[in-house]
Image (cartoon, grey):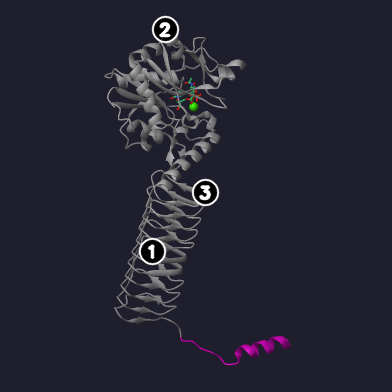
Amino acid sequence: MKGISIIILAAGLGTRMKSNLVKILHPLAGMPMLAYTLDLAKSLKPEKIVAVIGHQAEKVKDTFSDYDVNWAIQKEQKGTGHAVMQAKNALNNFNDTVIVLSGDTPLLKKETISELIKSHKSKGSRVAILTTEIDNPYGYGRVIINANGKVERIVEEKDASETIKKIMLINTGIYAFDKEFLFNALSEIKPNNTQGEYYLTDIIGIAAKRGLEINAVKAKDSDEVMGINTRLELARAEKIIRKRINDRWMLNGVTIIDTETTFIDDTVEIGRDTIIYPNNFICGKTKIGEGCTIFPNSRIIDAEIGSEVKIKDSCLIEESKIGDRASVGPFAHLRPYTELGKGVKIGNFVEIKKSVLMDGAKANHLTYLGDSSIGRNVNIGAGTITCNYDGFKKHRTEIGDNVFVGSDVQFIAPVKIGKGAIVAAGTTVTEDVPADSLVISRTKQISKKGWARKKRERQSKS
Ligand code: UD1
Ligand code: CA
């Protein structure tokens, strides 16, 4: 949008969070809080975005290093008005509308801020402020309306009298200003208040005193402009964002059986006709195809899942790729760099790490496969283990197509099994196996007739 620049206030520690981590980096539905405001700012395509940071500034910059944003530093946190002043230099070559957003108001929607901008521009106002009415206004600045129905000033909770505290019209901390007016008025504010801070809100009173009309635009949904100051509000915001995401996927053709216990990050993608059972966490850059079923209790992080895949109960899936019609679980752990081909079956209590299982391969029970490549249609028997670590280094196990591995086999890596071989149950494979051979390593079985009965008789006598 031409003619607008955006300042985002994000320098405060967030004292009321009682945390060692700066407030705006607290995770909210899988993303650091500030990401929401930065994304919203970006979506408005302004000429410039200036984020004012201070507490843990380096960490904040690192977290958002791939964002196109100008960072302004507020060394000491002397209030929201002082914070805006720190953005002045970055806006030297800009002369139009400045939007001020707060890094701790992540639920704000594009339509609402666009309405504020539209009203500001069309009325040619110098100051526009987004307000809302809420049932419990505790903690917010109250908007004082004079006898003529005009905004007169804003009074912070900490400076408010009992009468003012009863006002339910609040300042959302979101504004549109004419740039010249903004910095001019800011030079007049003084820290004469309970907190000894330079309040940005004081310029509303300054504007009114100068006879300027304050353009107050009321947000309909007070949830959307909720400021997050405590962990209670963080949890409330989390619920609202989770609901928005779930609603979006349901409207796009995904069945969510219990929306209260389904946690999908904003960055996830899901195909239609996929069914998600309760108590699933689907996180990060995960992509799920069409017609999949995600049974209860799994956590899926940064995974790429094809179509018609079944994730049975209680799996942990990290940075893995799963081909169409594959089935995983119950109780499986796919660790990073696992790749499952089409129709692969991974069953109960199987752990896989840095391994490729090609189309049609199966590992149905109690298995560990690490640093391995498993060919097409290979059967891995119950209890099979790749011994990939010798205490110093990791080694690879390579198993060709159509190999049959019986139960309780150990592969002492590095080792290669040729195509079509059969590995007998109980074998410890220490050397490469040629294609189509049988490999067996067991001590010969001895059965001593009557031995057990005689032992019992001896024991009962003594
Ligand atoms: C502020 C408003 C209040 C409004 C509320 C809406 C002021 C004085 N008060 O109060 O009227 O109802 O937001 O949510 O503006 N910040 C800085 N530097 C500072 C101080 C704050 O960058 O020196 C940043 C914070 O990191 C935060 C934002 O400004 O992102 C708001 O600060 P906060 O202390 O949360 O203000 P509130 O008390 O919520
Ligand atoms: Ca706040």
Q: Which residue is mark 3?
A: 261
Q: Are marks 1 and 3 in contact (CB under 8 Å)?
A: no
Give the amino acid type for the residue marked by disc 1 in the picture: Ala
Mark 1 sits on what residue?
A: 326
Position of 255 relative to 379 (above/below): above
At x 35%, y 21%, the residue is 98
The image quadrant where one finds the C terminus is bottom right
Residues shaded magenta:
444-462
Residue 271 rendering spot, x and y as whole percentages:
37, 52
Task: Determine which of the numbered discs, if any, sits on residue 211 in the image.
Answer: 2
Residue 155 placement (x, y as % from top left): 52, 16
User: Residue 42 appears in which quarter of the rendering?
Assistant: top left
Q: Does the rendering let one see residue 310?
A: yes
Q: Earlier in the sequence, mark 3 or mark 2?
A: 2
Residue drawn at x 40%, y 35% as measured from the top left: 36
* Kind of residue at disc 3: Thr
